[in-house]
Image: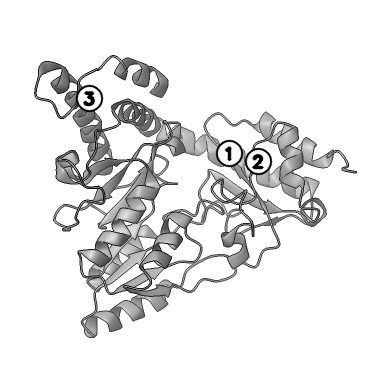
Amino acid sequence: EAKDAMIAALELFGNPSSTHSEGRKTKALVERVRKEIAAALNCLPAEVIFTSGGTEADNWALQSSVDFLGATKLYHSELEHHAITHMVEALAHRVDTVSIPFDAHGDHDLEWLEAQLAADRQAGRKALVSLMHANNEIGNLADLDRLSKITRDHGALLHSDTVQTMAHLKLDFAATPLEFAACSAHKFHGPKGIGFAYIKQGTGVQPFIRGGAQERGHRAGTENVVGIAGLGAAFATAMAKLDEDAAHMTDVKTYAIERLRAAFPHVHFNGRSGDLNRSLFTVLNFYVPELHEGGMLNFQLDLQGFCVSGGSACSSGAVGGSHVLGGLKSPGGTRISFSRMTTRADIDAFVHALQNLPKLD
């Protein structure tokens, strides 16, 4: 669906900012996708702003909160995606950055956070809380409803990197208020390099990219119309199949856990990824001492046609390894991801490959 929509969009030659008929045709496509996304998220179309993806949306939220919304304290997690941790580092000279404590499973201490926010409000400090909805490496799910209530109760801003859960879980931004959320289309079979920022109306942010009146003046630059078309088609398909896909991926992940435990009694699942009630069904991160100790497992699997990573794809080639697994004091791990196209037969083949790895000289 996404591919077909993108090919069709290539026939739209008008600039969506132009007032002539060809421009209006293109603009109509962009606005239709925006309205469909807003309807699914129970928010206003004006609150959906197309971006290059989740990283831009995340960066925008944090920087605007500090520069324009008066945030003087930024609560974050050391387990966040680098889109957050690197921006936190960049802002550290302008705002008080505080890491939210977490345990050996990667669960954050929200009671501690609530006490801190209460003290901030009493002292007249404006705070921003940034916690991802689902961790991209270990799948841990944050309690977004509770985070929303805590921040509402204490007058704090809330940003959540929802890249992993967008179009996989039902999100309702009217029932669960927050100021900022993020989306990357490639997480639900859409094209890479396109996504959107959710920014609650009236928040008061300023443009992250300047130079034009596109996106109602919020984000300059001619819109990526072909990407938006693909995003819209992929999003619509994912929402239509949301329950069906969730059940399928939950079944496949359950089977993967069972097969890995049967084949490797010493297997360890990093974070909460092995707990189906506390992690997202798209991610499983495991460690087997006898397989991982040589440090070549993911390379060996790649040679056999299995695309896995030692953390997230954004850091799997980085020197020093995964900061998430490092934060959990895990000796290592392999992340496998599931989609609506993953089957039990794929899991059988994967476990068979693990049991029959070629020896490296």
Q: Foreground residue, 88 or 113?
A: 88
Determine whether 242 is above or below 121 in the image: above
Which residue extends farthest front? 211
Q: Is residue 19 above or below residue 273?
A: above
* C-alpha gap between disc 3 and disc 2: 41 Å
Q: In which quarter of the image is residue 225?
A: top left
Which circle's residue, 3 or 2, is located before the other in the chain?
3
| Label 1: element kind | helix
- Seen from the viewer's position, the closer of residues 246 and 191 is 191
Mark 1 belongs to which amino acid? Answer: Asp
Q: Which of marks 1 and 3 is nearer the N terminus?
A: 3
What residue is disc 2 on? 255
Q: Residue at x 13, y 56 (%)?
A: 202
Question: Residue at 34% of width from left, 67% of height from top?
Answer: 129
Image point 29% across, 47% down: which residue?
Answer: 197
The answer to whether residue 176 of the structure is visible from this angle is no
Q: Label 3, on which residue?
A: 29
Indicate which disc residue 110 carries. Answer: none
